[in-house]
Amino acid sequence: MQMKRAKGQTAPNRRNPPVGLARAHTRARICKASASAARVAVVLALAVVANGLWLIGSAGASGAPPGTVRAGAPHAGDGARSASAARGVRRRRSCRPARRKGRRRACRHKAPRRPPTSRPKPAPSPPPPTAAVGVHEHEYSITLTRGAVSSGRVLMELVNEGEDAHNLQIAPAGVDRPLASFDALGSGQRASQTLSLAPGSYRLWCSLPGHDAAGMHTYLTVG
């Protein structure tokens, strides 16, 4: 038979148990955790004791005091160290011959010596002129400082002493094609050239329009 609940009385909630019951569950969990921690501590202590007994026994067998490690006793890192040392020795042995071979090859096979290159000799300077002639131009005449010179290299110095521009043409007598020429110079300007003249008579004139006909011509004798 189901009992009737009194007015104001609520049904027990399974999801939210009473405070006393919750505290009891919490205490039980704490006890279980402390018991498991105690078990782990006991296991660790037994392991430490067993390790110490093993070290003492191995030291007694070898005659060394406890706590020391034998020189020939195997160690966890000995294998890796020996392997790395062997690799280093191999690398050194393999590198040394290569270096020595490279040095020997470099010494044996030397670059051939190049023969000394001969520097080009400077061009000989032309001989100095044997004579110099000054040519003075006016309106409308040409005056020479000397009328005759020896054959060879002759320095011709042209000076325009007039007010107009004048040029100069030089050719053997009876030949229309000039042997040498000077560009037109303004008043007071100068120019010079060195000519190789063979023996003979040479005509000098100004080729500007009307100047030759006005009297700007003369002759030079080369002996």
Image (cartoon, rainbow, N blue to C red):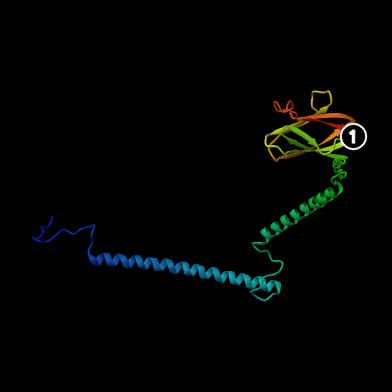
Looking at the rendered image, the quarter that the C terminus falls into is: top right
Q: Residue drawn 59% across and 72% down?
A: 52
Give residue 83's position: percent from left, percent from top.
70, 56
* Residue at x-position 67% and y-position 74%: 60
Q: In the image, residue 26 lies at what x, y percent?
A: 31, 66
Residue plotted at (43% across, 67% down): 37
Q: Is residue 129 above or below residue 55?
A: above
* Left or right: 91 in relation to 6: right
Q: Which residue is mark 1?
A: 151
Q: Is residue 112 left or right of residue 71?
A: right
Relative to 204, 42 lies left or right:
left
The quarter of the displayed image where residue 162 is located: top right
Q: Nearer the viewer, residue 78 or 11?
A: 78
In the orientation shown, which residue stands out farthest toward the bottom? 65
Q: Which SS class for mark 1?
A: loop
Residue 67: x, y in percent? Answer: 64, 74
